Image: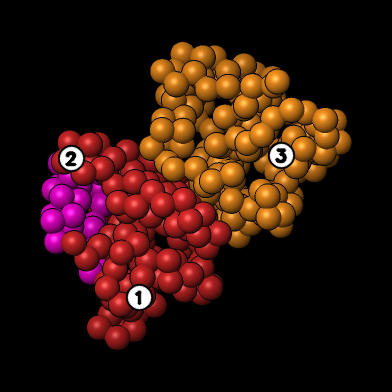
Chain colours: A red, B orange
């Protein structure tokens, strides 16, 4: 089992593929778990629904969160996370195509740790994923579980 | 008019201040750095009060680098007070400290720190970390609107 776990919350299959591909090329010792909507992300984090009885029940080292999700949106996922004692300290990075200032403000109001605009080109996206992993898996000290 | 500080460094150790300023000066972005040496001055700077009440600047820094061991008001208390006020609730704060005490790490996250970093030992490692911090928070990260 890898040293770190990244929870990637993303519904766009192309972006999931890009992220997984970028992560595979990197040297970081991390497992990537993908949740394709907000509900699944919350079930994973709270070990309910399809993730009830999740073995190990580890908290991710970082959660990478898209905002445009089917059903429960990214900001609502963040809000739920921050309201729960089990999950409220998890570092969350919003990675989204939107740089709408109102969304950026809302993200920070709800306690996001970092907000990154998703680049459209693969090379730039891969570079962002590399930076993100280096920073949140290596440089940052994660909260104790 | 005072140039807008992109980074507020809250640090009382002169060696660490010098290291940080040297590292920043060698970076591609070369950000404007404001140094304050205690928690009270940090709060006055960010809230534009006290000795900074008449200062002519407009925006909050894009990043606050905050040591925990400060004279007077400690770093965790500075963070708690910043997060209580609407005007500073969202400013990105990175704790940069020698402490790896669990109580400090938990205290930082519970008070809304964006990131917690242990100061590496040695000039080279410290410089590399400062450059990485700078690139991540000033280039990659989108700061909250002021």
Query: How much space separates mark 1 and mark 2, taking CA atoms?
Result: 27 Å
Mark 3 on the same chain as mark 2 = no
Q: Which residues are magenta?
A: A13-36
Q: Nearer the viewer, residue B125 or B37?
A: B37
**Mark 3, residue position:** B46
Determine which of the numbered discs, if any, sits on residue A121 in the image: 2
Q: Which residue is mark 1?
A: A72
Q: Is residue A22 visible?
A: yes
Q: Distance between the Cα atoms at labels 3 and 1?
A: 35 Å
Q: Is residue B57 left or right of residue A65?
A: right
Q: Secondary structure at mark 1?
A: loop
- Callout 1: few (<14), some (14-19), or many (20+) C-alpha neighbours within 10 Å? some
Q: Position of residue A118 (x, y in %)?
A: 29, 47
- On the question of residue B102 being in view, the answer is no
Q: Position of residue B86 (x, y in %)?
A: 68, 55
Q: In percent of the image, x 25 and y 68: which residue is there? A: A35
Residue at screen point 63% across, 57% down: B111
Asked if the stretch drawn in magenta spans residue B130, the answer is no
Residue at image coords 66%, 25%: B34
Q: Nearer the viewer, residue B52 or A64?
A: B52
How would you rate the neighbour count of disc 2 (Cα within 10 Å): few for under 14, some for 14-19, many for 20 or more? few
Q: Is residue B106 left or right of residue A139?
A: right
How crowded pointer 3 is (Cα within 10 Å; few <14, some 14-19, many 20+) is rated as some
Q: Tell me if A119 is positioned left or right of A87 in this view.
A: left
Image quadrant in which you'd find residue A69: bottom left
Instruction: Label 3: state its secondary structure.
Output: helix
Q: Residue at x 52, y 62 (%)?
A: A110
Mark 3 falls within which chain? B
* Of A62 and A107, the residue lying toward us: A107
Where residue A112 sits in the image (x, y, percent)?
48, 56
Q: Chain of mark 1?
A: A
Q: Is residue B110 above or below residue B68?
A: below
């Amino acid at each position: 089992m890898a040293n770190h776990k990244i929870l990637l919350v993303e519904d766009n299959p192309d972006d999931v593929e890009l992220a997984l591909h970028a992560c595979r090329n990197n040297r970081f010792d991390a497992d990537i778990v993908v949740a394709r909507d907000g509900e699944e992300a919350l079930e994973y984090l709270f070990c309910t629904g399809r993730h009830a009885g999740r073995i190990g029940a580890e908290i991710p080292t970082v959660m990478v969160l898209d905002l445009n999700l089917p059903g429960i949106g990214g900001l609502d996922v963040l809000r739920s996370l921050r309201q729960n004692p089990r999950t409220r300290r998890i570092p969350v990075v919003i990675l989204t195509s939107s740089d709408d200032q109102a969304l950026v403000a809302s993200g920070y109001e709800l306690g996001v740790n970092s907000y990154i605009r998703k680049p459209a080109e693969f090379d730039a996206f891969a570079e962002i994923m590399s930076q993100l992993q280096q920073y949140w898996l290596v440089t940052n000290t994660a909260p104790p579980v | 008019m005072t140039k807008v500080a992109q980074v507020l460094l809250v640090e009382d150790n002169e060696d660490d201040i010098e290291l940080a300023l040297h590292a920043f000066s060698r970076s591609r972005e070369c950000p404007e750095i404001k140094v304050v040496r205690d928690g009270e001055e940090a709060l006055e700077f960010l809230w534009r009060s006290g000795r900074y009440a008449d200062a002519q600047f407009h925006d909050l820094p894009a990043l606050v680098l905050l040591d925990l061991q400060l004279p007077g008001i400690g770093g965790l208390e500075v963070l708690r007070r910043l997060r209580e006020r609407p005007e500073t609730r969202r400013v990105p704060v990175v704790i940069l400290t020698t402490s790896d005490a669990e109580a400090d790490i938990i205290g930082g996250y519970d008070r809304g720190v964006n990131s917690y970093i242990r100061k590496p030992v040695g000039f080279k490692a410290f410089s590399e970390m400062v450059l990485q911090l700078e690139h991540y928070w000033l280039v990659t990260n989108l700061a909250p609107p002021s």
